[in-house]
């Protein structure tokens, strides 16, 4: 199939794009920059420049593709400096994102996957007090609302992600590795609480499974391992060979600030993905430690 991956220059979209290409699909990626990231295998794929928030993905530009993976939903990192936080997320996730799916339908695509966040399904109690989570719920519902007979839209809602794309820098994982090696002056501890974690590889498999077998209009809550933040960060220390045993403290960790823990430091989001849905989508489990080892191999 001819597949367009919007957000394919990012880590999750890029990994999914390379996975789909390895399965024999004709994949084009899209990003806001002028070209795919140099030094990565993403340069071997087709490229389309575009900014979905600006309305660049019109039906005429989307013509000729069979499937779409949308991996470009905005989170707090994407809000421009000085912009109103809530207004920007409303524009990006409530309005602009569903408009892309409407354009894909008009262009004649048959299936599309919206990559979303796990919070609305895994911790619905957080929706009322969090503008970001509200925008993610609106994106999930708005994209699927554009589905019609002949145009299937499926959401895949993912937890904390762990992994790498060869050659692609990471503002998250490279510091984790250097911290574990003792190269960053941050004390060795982890915040209390925890969440569900999943590897890039498992997510890419789930996205492929959703394209092939997903139920139209369905939102799938995917995930892998429930870990405390202490146990998660310990994986990095173990992988680099640092014998330190981390302690859990009820204290903000600069490398995982409180703003990045919507459930609140000290709290845990824990769930087990539905076994039937996991089998349907066909993604592996127990892959987080392997993903950390790949991160350390790349950035160590």
Image (spheres, helix red, strand yellow):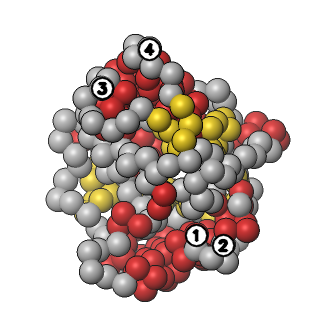
Q: Is residue 12 left or right of residue 125?
A: left
Find numbered disc 1 in the image and state the secondary structure of the residue it sits on.
helix
Q: How far across and down, in percent of the image, does residue 110 sit? A: 58, 62
The residue at which mark 3 appears reads as 182
Find numbered disc 3 in the image and state the secondary structure of the residue it sits on.
loop
Q: Are discs 1 and 3 less than 8 Å apart at CB? A: no
Q: Is residue 252 left or right of residue 11?
A: right
Q: Earlier in the sequence, mark 4 or mark 3?
A: 3
Q: Residues within 10 Å of mark 4 (few under 14, many from 20)?
A: few
Residue drawn 50% across the image and 38% down it: 190
Name the one closer to the observer, 143 or 77: 77
Q: Is residue 127 left or right of residue 132?
A: right
Residue drawn 30% across the image and 59% down it: 31
Q: How far across and down, in percent of the image, does residue 239 sit? A: 44, 18
Residue drawn 17% across the image and 59% down it: 34
Residue drawn 50% across the image and 49% down it: 251
Marking on residue 133? 1
The residue at which mark 4 appears reads as 243
Which corner quadrant of the image does residue 60 belong to? bottom left
Q: Is residue 244 visible?
A: yes
Q: Are discs 2 and 1 less than 8 Å apart at CB? A: yes
């Amino acid at each position: 199939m001819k597949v367009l991956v919007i957000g394919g220059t990012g880590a999750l979209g890029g990994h999914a794009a390379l996975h789909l290409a390895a399965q024999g699909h004709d994949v084009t990626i899209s990003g806001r920059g002028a070209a795919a990231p140099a030094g990565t295998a993403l340069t071997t794929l087709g490229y389309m420049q575009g900014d979905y928030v600006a309305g660049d993905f019109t039906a005429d530009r989307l013509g000729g593709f069979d499937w779409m993976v949308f991996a470009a939903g905005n989170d707090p990192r994407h809000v421009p400096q000085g912009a109103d936080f809530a207004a920007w997320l409303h524009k990006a996730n409530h309005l602009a994102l569903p408009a892309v799916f409407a354009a894909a339908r008009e262009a004649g695509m048959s299936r599309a996957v919206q990559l979303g966040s796990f919070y609305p399904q895994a911790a619905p109690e957080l929706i009322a007090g969090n503008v970001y989570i509200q925008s993610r719920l609106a994106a999930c519902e708005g994209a699927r609302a554009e589905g019609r007979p002949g145009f299937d839209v499926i959401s895949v809602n993912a937890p904390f992600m762990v992994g790498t794309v060869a050659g692609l820098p990471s503002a998250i994982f490279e510091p984790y590795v250097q911290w574990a090696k003792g190269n960053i002056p941050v004390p060795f501890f982890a915040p209390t609480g925890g969440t569900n974690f999943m590897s890039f590889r498992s997510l890419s498999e789930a996205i492929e499974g959703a394209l092939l077998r997903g139920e139209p209009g369905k939102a799938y809550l995917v995930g892998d391992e429930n870990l405390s933040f202490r146990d998660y960060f310990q994986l990095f220390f173990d992988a680099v060979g640092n014998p330190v045993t981390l302690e859990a403290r009820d204290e903000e960790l600069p490398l995982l600030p409180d703003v990045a823990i919507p459930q609140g430091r000290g709290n845990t989001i824990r769930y087990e993905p539905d076994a039937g849905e996991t089998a349907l989508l066909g993604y592996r489990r127990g892959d987080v430690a392997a993903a950390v080892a790949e991160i350390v191999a790349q950035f160590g």
